[in-house]
Image (spheres, rainbow, N blue to C red):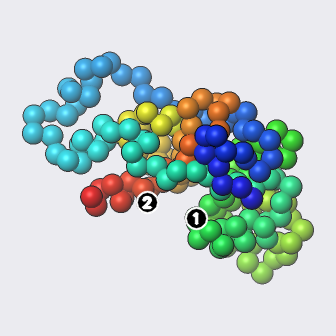
Amino acid sequence: MRHFADGGTPAVGQAHRMTTQLHAHSSANESHENSGLGASTADSILERSVSDFMTPGCDVISEAATVADAARVIADRRIHAVLVVGAQNGTPLGWVTARGLLGWLGRDRSLAPARDAITEQVTAVDPQERVRVALYALSLAGTTRLLVRRKPHKLPLGVITDFDLAIAAGR
């Protein structure tokens, strides 16, 4: 298991591509049109960059690790998910989540590969993208976290989750 951001090193090789990259396609004036007069603080949060609210870094394990290893990382780091990457090239395969591990209780986790416990696909967002785009992606079924990275072949800078946005709403 490794924790990495730009300039760091993933557990196995370098992440060469992610599954999905989200981009907003809007005109420069659209944000002004949507905000209207007297826009609230909540509206201004939606127009800020994802990088303002993401959690830096990303915890990863190799697909060659076991489900027990994934559970140990989640418990030891007190996180909600760990990213599983390909053993050969470091390509992100998906997330093993704390919720997904509930299905492994009472089963032998010591021999099953971590990739068998993946319950969420990788969706990525650019760090300069607006929070509005991340909020939309997080509202889709099966998406609870977004990998934050600049380009498909670049290492992740961090992760943004519904929890990060809930904290932003409370500020």
- The x and y percentages for residue 40 are 16, 45
- The x and y percentages for residue 94 are 69, 49
- Residue found farthest to the bottom: 106
Judging by the rendered image, the residue that carries numbered circle 2 is 163
Q: Is residue 124 visible in this depiction of the protein?
A: no
Give SS at disc 1. Answer: loop
- Residue found farthest to the front: 7
Judging by the rendered image, the residue that carries numbered circle 1 is 80
Q: Residues within 10 Å of mark 1 (few under 14, many from 20)?
A: some
- The x and y percentages for residue 158 are 55, 47
From the viewer's side, name the closer residue of 87 and 24. Answer: 87
Residue 49 is left or right of residue 20, and the answer is: left
From the viewer's side, name the closer residue of 53 and 5. Answer: 5
Q: First in sequence: mark 2 or mark 1? A: 1
Q: Residue at x 26, y 28 (%)?
A: 31
- Badge 2 amino acid: Phe
